Amino acid sequence: MDITAKDISNFLEEIAPVYLEEEWDNTGFLVGDENAVIKGVMVALDITKDVIQQAKNAGANMIVSHHPVIFTQISEVTNTRNSIVYELIKNDINAYCAHTTLDNANGGVNDCLAKALNLMEVKILEEFKDGQGTGRFGKLCKQMNAKELAEYTKIKLNSEYIRYADAGKQIENVAVVGGSGASFIDRAMELGADAIITGDIKHHDALKCLEMGITVVDATHFATEQIAKDRIISHLQTCLNKLQYSIVLVKADEKDIMSILVRE
């Protein structure tokens, strides 16, 4: 039997249902032909020209990404405007993007993050729908100070760039949010978090945390979300195995661009 882009989309929506999409988001099958026969799938955090080239080299004609390749309204697709979409079309590569659906899903980005950090007694930070939602709240395996938590996070998430603001107390209860989680600081405080681990923390966000007595660890947007790529690949492999069908499944080799810029 042939596996189509629509089949892959359906598999993905088993773990990231479309009803979990936030109003402002653009999730789903965004570029290509749903009836296209899929020979290989590349899983990435972002669809970039480099990822497209990697897909071509691997023989993959579909890319599954977390961040949407089309996010705002576009008026043209050319080799200079919206060129990523142009490159996908030119190379007959289909694109499915699971953004807030994967953020809000049980077993999605935030559960992957909590698991990577070995959190215990994990619960949802803020519910969205039907017992699913964004962020997780749990306990560390042992108490740590801010520096120890930052070092622990760096190792567990394989992050090359960590910043932290120390609230000056021992840390046991931790909130985690993949991507940009500053908007969840108040909720973390309500649940009694000693620290929040997320990405994209601005100066005033850090000050707010310190005023609340919460240590904040910025592990980068990339590192707090890229861990979910393995979850996607694992699920797709399980679905294909059940059908006794084999295609190329490969994870894109990506780096945290912002961290690289900061280090240089």
Image (tube, grey):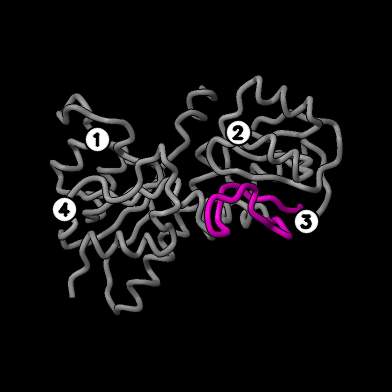
The image shows residue 189 at horizontal and vertical percentages of: 75, 38
Disc 3 residue type? Cys
Instruction: Please report the residue visible at 78 percent of the width from the left and 48 percent of the height from the top.
Output: 173
Instruction: Please report the residue visible at 67 percent of the width from the left and 56 percent of the height from the top.
Output: 123
Disc 2 residue type? Ser
Disc 4 is placed on an element classified as loop
User: In the figure, 233 relative to 50: above or below?
Assistant: below
User: Reading the chain from its start, which is encountered first: label 2 or label 3?
Assistant: 3
Nearer mark to the viewer, of 2 and 3: 2
The image shows residue 200 at horizontal and vertical percentages of: 56, 30
**Frontmost residue, 205 versus 242:** 205
For residue 217, side relative to residue 7 (left or right): right
User: Reading the chain from its start, which is encountered first: label 4 or label 2?
Assistant: 4
Residue holding disc 3 = 141
Residue holding disc 4 = 33
Tell me if residue 129 is in the magenta stretch: yes
Check if mark 4's residue and mark 3's residue have beta carbons within 8 Å.
Answer: no
For the N terminus, give its image quadrant.
bottom left
Dot 4 surroundings within 10 Å: few (below 14), some, or many (20 or more)? Answer: some
Res 183 label: 2
**Frontmost residue, 68 versus 258:** 68
Query: Which segment is the magenta one?
Result: 118-140
Disc 2 is placed on an element classified as helix
Residue holding disc 1 = 84
How far is the residue under mark 4 from the one under mark 2?
37 Å
The image shows residue 238 at horizontal and vertical percentages of: 40, 72
